[in-house]
Every structure is written in structure tokens, then in C-alpha cells.
Image: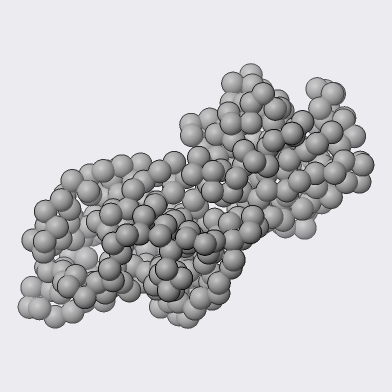
Amino acid sequence: MRVLVAPDKFKGSLSAADVAEHLSAGLASAGIVSRQLPLADGGDGSVDAAVAVGFTPHPVTVAGATGMPQRGRIAIDGSTAVVEVANTCGLSTLPGGRRAPLDASSLGMGQAVGHALRHRPTRLVLALGGSAATDGGTGMLAALGFTFHDAAGRPLRACGRTLPEVATIDSSRAVNLSGIEIVIAGDVTNPLTGPNGAAAVYGPQKGADPAAVRYLDAGLDTLVEAFTRSGYPQARAVAASPGAGSAGGIGFAAMLLGARMVSGADYFLDLLDFDGYLAGMDLVITGEGSIDEQTGHGKLLAVLAERAHPVPVVAIAGRNSLPRHRWQQSGFSRICALGDYTDRDTSTDPDLTGELLTRIGREIGAGSLLHNEGSR
């Protein structure tokens, strides 16, 4: 049996590469040789996934979410560069994990983009999952040469707190991005402002209480007006477009720079050559931390299953709430949950997660999971 092991990360526990390694070890103990393809969908882990398929990693030191130096990395392959928020200025870079909804900035993302541009790419892929800031992308733009001023002409620090003060924006010294295709790979469809906008929907995850959400949403609206006055007449239309609200508004800023939004799942499956890895396989094993009703709505695992058909797909999850009668409809021959093997919480226990993944890989390799519907 030829098996492709192509999982996403188990967030908070194991990287996609670690998940693939444990599943493959289990398969190997049952005599099955597998091929590994760690995946991502444009969120955190995207750089790691690109490196796993041959992109060259380049370490960078940038400003973390609150300005502290942060070691991250970008991935380069010829003319394509992959840069992500998560490992530069995302939630994981907050000192002590303490949320800073008003003072966090996307500056580090812009600095990482600057590092990527030194390699002269013709395509820049922005992975926007795991962001800590709701600054409308002003931090990223500041790193690329934009300056933001209040009504008196004083320069402002780029962060959520200063958004209501932005009156004018100077892009005369901005980096020239002409000739570079900028791609936002993700599945966020929220606009920048309003009840479905960046602050209202994602602000609470970043520590914003109701008052801070209102403050940030009003500030983002002020930012749009400032861009409109400062030579970007399309700013209001861009702000209303799907995906502008991704990563606290980095999507909006990137679109002003000419970026286009694409399905993160499809784009990364192409970027990582999933179809090439799939050729000749008898089974695909995939997985992620949680599988639920949303999985079938354009999420990575369901897109993978559709592209793998008619090759059967077994999905592994830390938690699964998708009822059995929906498995086939979502493209899965079987779903295995770590919660079926233990009463302990695996979401923050990498060792236990790894042990269980190895066990499941061994059971799949031995055929007990695939041929015994009564087994766990």
C-alpha cells in the first residue's frame, strides 16, 4: 500500500511536520512505507510547510507584536517568497502571551516583507493567520515606507491605539512593489469595518473588550477616510471587499498595495505540489487539531479530500464533532479523533499527541482501522 501522509498542524500541540512524522512512524512499524507532505492553508505554519517541500528558509529578526525583537523566518524558492504574520508579529510573539489589542502592531510583518524583497521575488505570498494586532496593516505599511500623521502633521506610531488620530498618509517614500505579484492566501472573507469587520469578529480573540472593539472599529473607519484623502480614492471599496478584514486589516493594506485574495487551501495545495505527491498513492492520511461542521466549507482538509478523489482519505483530529453520516459527504472514508483514545486533553500535550498519532498510524497500517468499523 502506498500512503501519502499530508496533515496540517495540530494547533498548540504539534507542527504539521511533527504530525506527519508520528503518523509515518506508526505506519512504518506496521511495515508500510509512506511519503510525507506537511501542509498549511495560508495561516501559521505556512513558512514551515513551504520549507518542508524544498523552499529555502531564511532567518529574520523583526519587531514582535509589541516591538520586542523576534526571531522568525521566511521561505524563498526561486521567484516566490512566503512570509507569515504568525512567526513574525503574531499572537505567539506577545511577551508572556499577554494580549495587547490596542498596542500590538504588524510592523514585524512589513519588516519580514522587506527582507523577502532583497531576494528579488516576482511573487510574494502573505500568510495572515495568527495575527495579534488590529492596526489596519499600518505597521506593515510603515515598515515599507508609509508614514502616518495626525491633524497637526505629527507622525504617529502605527498601531491600533493611534488609528483614530490618523489624518493624512504619505506614501511618497514607499517601497516600489511594481512587477511583484502579491497574493493573500487565506479563507477570511470579512470586510475591514462594521459588525462583520476585523475588530468586531476577531478583536475579542486578541484581547479586545467591547469598548476596545468599538474604538478599533471607529479607528479603522478613520484610517479608510485618511487613505481616501491621501491619494487612494479606492480605499472605501477596498475596505468593503472580502478579506480586507483579515489579520486585523493587513488584508486591507495588502490590497491597497495591489494584492489579490485567493483560497488558501487551494493555493497552498498547488504551491506544495499536492497533486504531484498524490500520483500513484492508494491512501491519503490527513489531519488537523479540530474537525467540525465548518471543515466542509472550503477548509483545507475538505479541499484536499475533493482533490484526492477517488483515492480514499482518512482524517485524524484532536477533536471531531462531525457526525458519522457527514464523513463521506465531506470526502473522508474515516475520521479518527485522539479523544477516542484518551480522556486527557491532548491540545496542549505534544508528547501524548505524538504517542496517539503513532498508535493510530500503526492501526491504519495494520488495517484494523480501515476494515473494522467497530474499532475506535
Give the side of residue 279 with respect to residue 238, left or right: right
Number of callouts:
0
Give the side of residue 355 with respect to residue 77, left or right: right
Q: What quarter of the picture does the C terminus occupy? A: top right
Task: Work out whether residue 336 can be spotted.
Answer: no
Give the side of residue 68 with respect to residue 57, left or right: left
Relative depth, front residue between 293 and 84: 84
In the rendered image, residue 333, in percent from the top left (x then y), is placed at 70, 25
Relative depth, front residue between 308 and 141: 308
Q: Is residue 152 above or below residue 138?
A: below
Relative depth, front residue between 39 and 159: 39
Q: Is residue 372 above or below residue 33?
A: above
Task: Work out whether residue 14 can be spotted.
Answer: yes
Q: What quarter of the picture does the N terminus occupy? A: top right
Which residue: 14% across, 57% down? 232
In the rendered image, residue 83, in percent from the top left (x then y), is placed at 47, 62
Furthest residue in direction top, as rendered:
325
Which residue: 85% across, 23% down? 372
In the rendered image, residue 87, in percent from the top left (x then y), is placed at 52, 66
Which colouring convention does the figure follow? one colour
In which quadrant of the rendered view does residue 309 lie?
top right
Q: Is residue 83 above or below residue 298?
A: below
In the rendered image, residue 359, in percent from the top left (x then y), is placed at 84, 44
Which residue: 77% across, 58% down? 351
Give the side of residue 297 with respect to residue 32, left or right: left
Which residue: 87% across, 30% down? 367
Relative depth, front residue between 225 and 341: 225
